Image: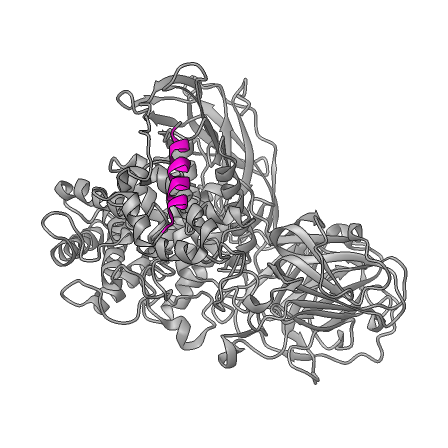
Amino acid sequence: MTVAKEPRIVGLRVGRRRDLSVAASPRPPVSWLVEAPAAWEATRAELRLDGGTTVATRPYGILEDWPFAPLRAGAAHRLEARVIGADGTASAWSEPCEIRAGFPAEAWNAPFLRLASPRRTAQPFLARRDFEVAETVVAAELQVTAHGVYRARLNGVEVDDAVLNPGWTAYQHRLPLHLTDVTPLVRVGATNTLAVEVAGGWYTEAYGFGETAERFYGDQPAASPLLRLRHRDGHVQEIRPDDRWRLSGDGELVSSGLYAGDEIDLCRRPRGWEAAGFDDAAWETPALSEPGRQPEAIDVEPVRRIRSLPVAAMPASDDPERVLLDFGQNLVGRVRFRVSGPAGTRIVLRHAEAPEGGRLNTRPLRAAAATDTFILDGAADTVCEPRFTFHGFRYVEVTGYPGELDPADFTAVVLHTDLRRTGWFSCSDERLTRLHENIVWSFAGNALALPTDCPQRDERLGWTGDAQVFAPTAASLFDADAFFASWLEDVAAEQRARGGRVPTVVPQTLGRLGETMAAGWGDAVTVIPTVLHERFGDQRVLERMTDAMRAWVDAVADAAGPERLWERGFQYGDWLDPTSARPDKAKTDPGLIATAYFARSARLTADALARSDDAPAAGRYAALAAEVRDAFVASYVTPRGRLASDAPTAYALALEFDLLPVSLRSAAAERLAFLLRAGGYRMATGFLGTPLVLDALLSNGQEWAAERLLLQTMCPSWLYPLSQGATTMWERWDAVRPDGSLHPSGMTSLNHYALGSVGDVLHRRVGGLACAEPGWAQVRIQPWFVSALEHADVAHDTPRGRASVSWERDADIRGQIRVRAQVPHGVTAIVDLGDRAPFPVGAGTHTWDATTPVRTLAPIGVDSDLALIADTPDACAVVSRSIAGHSPEMAAEFDAYIRWVPGSRLRDELAAVSAPDALVTYIDGALAALTH
């Protein structure tokens, strides 16, 4: 980070989204960064609108309240800011922020355009209108809402670079409105043409599984485009949806579905339809329908084309007519390609995450066809790309391609909500660095309009549990405040319709399945607002969600009853616990998990109310949290610190949610470490336990167990998927089996971010950079000096500027470590290096030398104690792989029953599976080599 020589304000903006300053409401929040010399102290900032009177406010602008009169819809303004120091000096005024008030002018009464007589379900259509523009027009804004998705052109030019506009919200509660300044595209004094292509998108998709799938919102798409032309004298002319528009259902887009894919017949393309002078006499007059509800400007970045990837390889195919393309990265998006061929040539692209036997393995897609079809019109060098769909894939199968396929003509276009990357991590172990990048790819791909579970099969839904566990990691990686804040509006709306119950998917499109009231899923309504407040300083979203938080906790209290134990009804529990054969039958009792979350959400609600200065209500929920905690201890905790469910997730929850008496925390942490070692430090937690387990160990003196768990390579573990070529996070720990086959379940996604919740630990613990006060007003620098690492680096663009920590071992002095840190202006840091008492520092660049204990590994062999072997890096993996090399069946039997506990020898356990002497001798030598 460059330290400013003089104080200045940069990055001035309104609203939450960062890609442009559009005010989605009359009183948008205002944000900025202060850059200044470390010793310079800021005391206040000043804002001025359109060069007028200045208004004083706090110096560091993190979603500050709008200090001026409310904005008028459609208005344009210039906002400037400067910062004032304690010494009386003032910075120069900032670069002006050009604001556009992007919310509807009044109650929306523009009707929807739709086909009067559609011939098939979810039929795409084209809509156009010619109109004259007077020479007095000085500005133009296009406002569009839709039942579906659209793309618009003005005079043949795309109005913006957004994709799948206007996105997906809970349409029955919130209808999204997309606004675009199209002034540069208007031709004054001439005939202009507004052209809109519309498809069903999320609106007409069929949701559900198998025969239960059905269309939730409607059967046909519609759109309501409103073009507002502002004249020199201030009056506004509207080009509205009416019977002067002309529609056609016979465009080149034959059909479109998010799960099915697009079919595009270029022979049906109406040439010139997007420009003035096109003869649309044969097109039909639209059917018009009332909007039903007021659309809203959505204060979040749109989906865009983010990057392109070339073909990395062409795997062998079992059919010469089928060409396989490998893009080298599991991604979310679609394929663009260039082709020349005879008219009528039919090219089909099928997408999947993995091949099998020379073909795509499409079984995990279930009912999603994930197929795009293109029919050529004979033109040379035609560029083909789907319009209104997306796929989760790494591999593409191409059939029908004319002539020899050149992979250079094919590109994968990556799509997701255009979030700004704000967090980075790397270290000396390339596997951990790759794991981190896999986490980034998985969240980015599943941050498409809203936080989804997976991008490839017939699902792609806003599962609340997945979002809840991953939100802290998302906040470490991206500026995700606007993204989650928008989705929380849908969560609150769906909850209000259910009397406090939060559905398991939002938007709720799954019928009875989505209505389940589940711990860890519904708690998204308390956890995610808390995360946004802590990481982004977003007090507004916390205050806005307080009623929803209270309603959820009240609903759980009703379900739990006066005993304060939530033990009734279905629970997802520790979903996909790898030690269980069924995803919903984890080893940790679901009642214990639900009661733990009940206590946590009550506590978070009390804290939120306290920040809102509602002391009486805060006190009531704090008392409720204490009651639930007492009930948890009385019902699930023994006097010696054992839990009724003797499983890692139970201990992780109890420790991280602060549900245990202080006197029992050490015993519980020791038991957690014991259980993990007994399993050979393989993962034994599902969706709810995984985000907590490393913190539970590290906060309670079990660093070695945490290191062994983090660096495990056997299945299941965080690093195991890398051995199978993973480039994203998996839904299941064993989504790809050690023999290379996909898990046989129909629920097997290779792009699912939930288990990537370890990413936040990599930043906070391994890198050592954590948020200590809301909005990063204070940071905590406390690296975990993992003994197997030589160095680690983490950086984060906080709301106050970039902070970073790096540490590196001295090559000559064992146990000596150099730590460097950058603290942004106006931020203090608490530094804990482990070898001295924590101490504070201010802004600027800092360097410290720290010492850490050096762990010495004892020699091991087959006659060593099992616990000693398990505590030796890679030892369990060496044993298991050695047995598997001799007999996979013997290895499966050994791994299934072995418990790496003190008091037993490995030689005896090998004898129990009839390991031959030669194998025992081989393993003895392999183990000895680990510590030499």
Work out whether 657 lies above or below 53: below
Q: Taking the image as drawn, is residue 762 in sight?
A: yes
Q: Position of residue 385 (x, y in %)?
A: 74, 60
Viewer-side residue, 185 vs 208: 208
535 inside magenta stretch: no
261 vs 674: above or below: below
Measured as percent of width and height from the top left, residue 580 is found at 34, 62
**Residue at point 54% right, 17% down?**
5
Quarter of the picture holding the C terminus: top left
In front: 284, or 709? 709
Q: Is residue 928 magenta?
A: yes
Residue 70 versus residue 373: which sits nearer the camera? 373
> Residue 517's spot in the image, x, y percent?
33, 68
Q: What residue occupies the far top of the structure in this picture?
A: 812
Region of the chain picked out in magenta, as a range: 915-931
Report the residue that reaches farthest toward the left. 639
Direction from residue 673 to residue 146 in the image, left or right: right
Residue 308 pos. (x, y %): 69, 48
